Image (cartoon, rainbow, N blue to C red):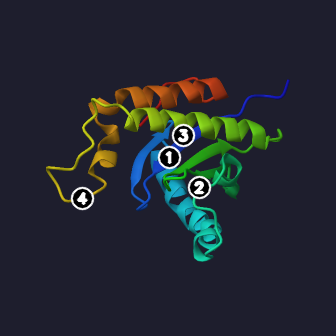
């Protein structure tokens, strides 16, 4: 049996490139994973620019087209990307090891993270209207708030299932 993936961080980024949630699982490296999430946006934009520029591009990509694969490797971390049909970007930062990372494992992890976001946004009791502000990303910016507790808990459960760090999430 291959060793489990070592998940260091998960980032959810809005269609307007605002961070929704950046969850780190390595103590002391929070800023590093914010940097990784933001630099991943450049690679994601390059890879998806060809899909939106042509008129023959599909409007609803399948899950295999959503998976962007390895975005880049930096020092001891590899960043993998996924973009939902609603253009929410999910970035996973894995520790670089000598073991082989299978795309099937990552695709299932991305699908689980996507479903966690879907369930959080589909909650009828979660206030998603931005009546108090004109910023259309207002509900996403509250992902760190107490009403998004179940979403953060699901992300933590997925991390533990993948073999994330044994410690509790940092941010």
Tags 2 and 1 in contact by the CB under 8 Å rule? no
Q: On the image, numbered disc 1 is attached to which residue?
A: 11
> Dot 1 surroundings within 10 Å: few (below 14), some, or many (20 or more)?
many
Residue 106 image offset from top left, x and y in percent = 70, 40
The image shows residue 51, relative to residue 102, as above or below, that is: below
**Quadrant that contains the C terminus:** top left
Q: Could you tell me how far apart the alpha carbons at marks 3 and 1 are, in whole angstroms? A: 11 Å
Helix, strand or loop at label 3? It is: helix
> Dot 2 surroundings within 10 Å: few (below 14), some, or many (20 or more)?
few
Q: Nearer the viewer, mark 3 or mark 1?
A: 3
| Foreground of the two, 53 or 13 | 53
The image shows residue 36, relative to residue 163, as above or below, that is: below
Q: Nearer the viewer, mark 1 or mark 4?
A: 4
Decide which of tag 2 and tag 3 comes sooner along the chain. 2
Residue 60 image offset from top left, x and y in percent = 59, 55
Q: Is residue 95 left or right of residue 150?
A: right
Q: Could you tell me how far apart the alpha carbons at marks 2 and 3 are, in whole angstroms? A: 15 Å
Q: Nearer the viewer, mark 2 or mark 1?
A: 2
Q: Is residue 94 left or right of residue 119?
A: right
> Dot 4 surroundings within 10 Å: few (below 14), some, or many (20 or more)?
few
Residue 59 image offset from top left, x and y in percent = 57, 61
Decide which of tag 3 and tag 1 comes sooner along the chain. 1
Q: On the image, numbered disc 4 is attached to which residue?
A: 135
């Amino acid at each position: 049996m291959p060793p489990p993936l070592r998940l260091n961080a998960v980032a959810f980024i809005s269609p307007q490139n605002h961070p929704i949630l950046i969850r780190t699982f390595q103590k002391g490296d929070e800023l590093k994973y914010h940097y990784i999430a933001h630099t991943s946006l450049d690679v994601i934009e390059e890879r998806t620019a060809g899909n939106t520029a042509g008129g023959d591009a599909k409007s609803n990509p399948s899950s295999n087209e959503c998976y962007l694969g390895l975005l880049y490797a930096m020092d001891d971390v590899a960043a993998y990307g996924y973009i939902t049909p609603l253009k929410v970007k999910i970035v996973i930062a894995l520790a670089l090891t000598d073991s082989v990372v299978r795309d099937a494992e990552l695709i299932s992890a991305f699908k689980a993270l996507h479903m966690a976001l879907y369930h959080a946004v589909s909650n009828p009791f979660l206030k998603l209207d931005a009546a108090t502000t004109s910023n259309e990303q207002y509900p996403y910016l509250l992902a760190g708030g107490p009403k998004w507790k179940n979403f953060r808990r699901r992300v933590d459960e997925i991390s533990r299932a993948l073999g994330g760090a044994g410690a509790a999430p940092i941010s």
